[in-house]
Each structure stands twice: as C-alpha cells, then as structure tokens.
Amino acid sequence: LKFAERKKKFQHPNFGGIPNQDVKHLTPIQRKYNEASSGILNLFINSINGKLKELREMLKIEEALLLIDEIDMLYEEEVFIKDCGIEEARIADFLYFCSDDERFVGLAKNTEKLTLT
C-alpha cells in the first residue's frame, strides 16, 4: 500500500487521524483498583488484607464527587437558590445528599437537563 492509502485506512472522521483518541482514560483510583485486582497473587493478597474493599469504597466516593461536579457545572447557582430555596453555602451539601439517592443518580446520568429539575 502506498503511504496515502495507509493513512486513509487509519483515519476516522471523528478522530482526525489520531490513533487511540477514543481510549477511556482511567483515574488514579481506577488504575490502583485494576492493579490490585489483576493477577492471582495480587487478587489473593489484596482480598485478605482488605485493600480491594477500601478501593471499591474509594471508587464509589470518586464517582459521587464526579457526578456532583458535573451537576454543579451544568446548573447555575441561581437555580438552587431561587427555585429550590437552598442557601448558597449549602449547595454542595445538597448535591452530596442527593448523590446518595439512586433516582437522582439515574436522572443525573440522563442527557436531558430538564428531567433532573
């Protein structure tokens, strides 16, 4: 194959020809969990000493915090203050409280903004 033909073969219109651009980047906690649960020896040792349970809990907390940040960026503070009647200093507490509710998490992951309000 000529160079131009090989180049077209690897180009995708969404990626601009950059390979592996669609690869999901893991957070440090996700990488630690994957490392701790990979391999027979790591899995066995980390199951016994409780590191896997600790990392699972850290993953849940991280997921909740990412969701809170996403919702906080999606809505203006006035929405919480005027529409919901929440004090400005308590908005983060309210979002953290809501992140424990399964219905809120389901609605927050929904792409439609109005469904959540």
Image: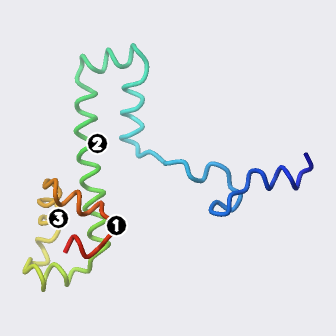
Residue type (three-letter) at the residue carrying disc 1:
Thr
User: Image height check: is 34 above or below 103?
Assistant: above
Picture residue at 83% right of the left edge, 49% below the top: 6
Q: Classify the position of the N terminus by image quarter.
A: top right
Disc ID at residue 36: none
Residue 15's place in the image compared with 74, above or below, is: above
Name the residue located 36 percent from the left edge and 33 percent from the top edge. 33
Q: Residue furthest right?
A: 2
Mark 1: secondary structure = loop
| Mark 2 lies on residue | 59
Give the total number of marks visible in the rendering. 3
Q: Quadrant of residue 74?
A: bottom left
**Viewer-proximal residue, 104 or 66?**
104
Within-10-Å neighbours for mark 1: few <14, some 14–19, many 20+: few
Q: Which residue is mark 3?
A: 95
Instruction: Kindly report the distance in space between the C-alpha atoms of the residues bearing marks 2 and 3.
Output: 18 Å
Q: Which residue is mark 1?
A: 111
Amino acid tagged 3: Leu
Tell me the CA gap for discs 2 and 1: 23 Å
